[in-house]
Every structure is written in structure tokens, then in C-alpha cells.
Amino acid sequence: MSRPSEEDRRLLGGRDVAEAGLTDWVLLTGVLHARFRIPDYATGLSLVAQVGAAAVAADHHPDLALRYAELDVRLVSHDVGGVTARDLRLAREISVAAARAGARPTSVGLAVVELALDTSAVDTVRPFWAAVLGYTDDDGAPHGARDEVRDPHGVAPSLWFQEAGPDPSPPAQRFHLDVWVDPAAVEPRIRAALAAGGTLHSDAEAPAYWVLADPQGNKACLCTWQAR
């Protein structure tokens, strides 16, 4: 395969993906995600084979997770650490193959969960967490982020380090969850959280993220690609 063109190496954001009209796909943490409901396992196996053939032809490498009734697909250009036009092209091919197989796209429940640690000493604590979790800070991209560590197999949640102030007294809550969802899923999740006894702690940074708290005040963030 020839080296990707500069255009095919250009990183795309959420607005680019939305304008591409890929209604089957959601951009979460810089990766394209899709979930297809399949009528039976045999159909899922056949669809995996079709996706694999298209990926080989494109010299691309999507991550696939096949369960009894669902196939999850993740697309990202690992060489540049984000979504590019190559991912959009393959996403369209996968959607066509899924439709022909009778698979139905659904974004219900599709989310990415990150762990976040509030700390004023990122460089001090980061090596410990990489070691104890068996994680790496090298995601294969030339711009590997210093503020996070990742599961090298791409299965477990990543851990990122949120810069905190120099206050020597520890905060009441150091760890929190960041839950990345489709922008269309935010309002239903907020309503469900409030109905479950939670509170909306802050929407000052919306639509990038909303801060929610459980009845004891433990916080979590609902995050989207918007306004980033």
C-alpha cells in the first residue's frame, strides 16, 4: 500500500464527522464507534468477514467486538492518533455491508468510560498508575499524551490526570468518571440521573461536558465532542 496522502492524514473533529452524514457512527474520545444489532450469530460472523475484507483492501485495522446480538466496531487512524478521511470511507463501506446483512445500527448504550484522577503532581504519580494497571502512555501516535495512560489492548478504561491546584489538603473526591456519549444521548441520561436521585452540579462547560453528582455528592461528567 502507498503512503497515505496529507489529506488522508489530517485529523478530523466531531463537526467534520457530523457533516459527513455518518448517521450510524458516533465520535467518542477521538474514535469512531458504531453498534449494529444482528438478527443471529451466523449473520454476525458473516458481517465480521465482510468488514475484515474491506479493511484489508483499505489497509486499515478496525477493532471488532462480536456478541450474540450485537457487533461493535471502532475506527481510528493509529498512525496519527485520531479519525481521518480513511476512517470515514471505511465507515461508509461497513454501514453498507451491515445494511445488506440486515443489521440495524443503534447508538443506545454506546459510550466510552474514562477514569480521571485530580492531582497536582501528574509526572510524579503517572508512572505508578501505568505500572500497577499494566498500562502504557504510548498509544502508537507520534504525539502520545503525557496526561493519560492507556490499556495497550484497548479494552479497559483509560486513566487521565486532571491538573489540580497546589492546595496541600486532599479534595473529598480525587477520582471521578468521564462518560463520553453521543450528544443526542446527553439529555436522556441527565433525566435518568436526576430521576435516580442525582443532581446537576454544573452545566457551565456544556455542551463539552455536564457535571452530575450522586446523592452523596460524588461527581461524574457526561462528555461529548462538542465545543472542543
Image (cartoon, grey):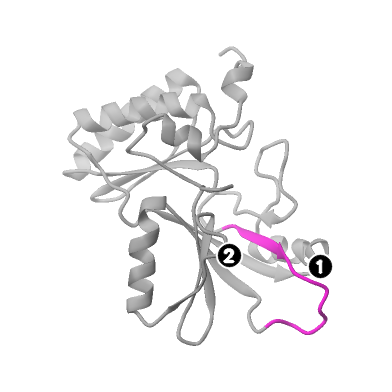
Considering the whole magenta stretch, tell me its main secondary structure: loop
Position of 7 relative to 193 (above/below)? above
Q: Quadrant of the N terminus?
A: top right
**Percent coordinates x, y for residue 20 in the rendering:** 41, 29
Residue that mark 1 sits on? 121
* Between 60 and 225, the one nearer to me in the picture: 225
**N-terminal of the two: label 2 or label 1?**
2
* Between 78 and 209, the one nearer to me in the picture: 209
Callout 1: few (<14), some (14-19), or many (20+) C-alpha neighbours within 10 Å?
A: some
User: How many marks are shown on the rendered structure?
Assistant: 2
Position of 113 relative to 45 (above/below)? below
Alpha-carbon span between mark 2 and mark 1: 17 Å
Q: Amino acid at mark 1?
A: Ala
**Percent coordinates x, y for residue 104 in the rendering:** 22, 41
> Residue sitting at 54 percent across and 54 percent down?
208
Q: Which mark is residue 115?
A: 2
Magenta span? 158-171
* Between 121 and 42, the one nearer to me in the picture: 121
| Magenta stretch encompasses residue 168 | yes
> Residue sitting at 54 percent across and 67 percent down?
177
41 relative position to 194: left or right? left
| Magenta stretch encompasses residue 213 | no
Position of 138 relative to 49 (above/below)? below
Position of 58 relative to 181 (above/below)? above
Quick one: SS at disc 2?
Answer: strand
**Percent coordinates x, y for residue 121 in the rendering:** 81, 67
> Residue sitting at 20 percent across and 32 percent down?
101
Q: Amino acid at mark 2?
A: Leu
Quick one: SS at disc 1?
Answer: loop
**Percent coordinates x, y for residue 220 in the rendering:** 52, 70
User: Of all residues shown, which one is farthest toward the front?
Assistant: 204
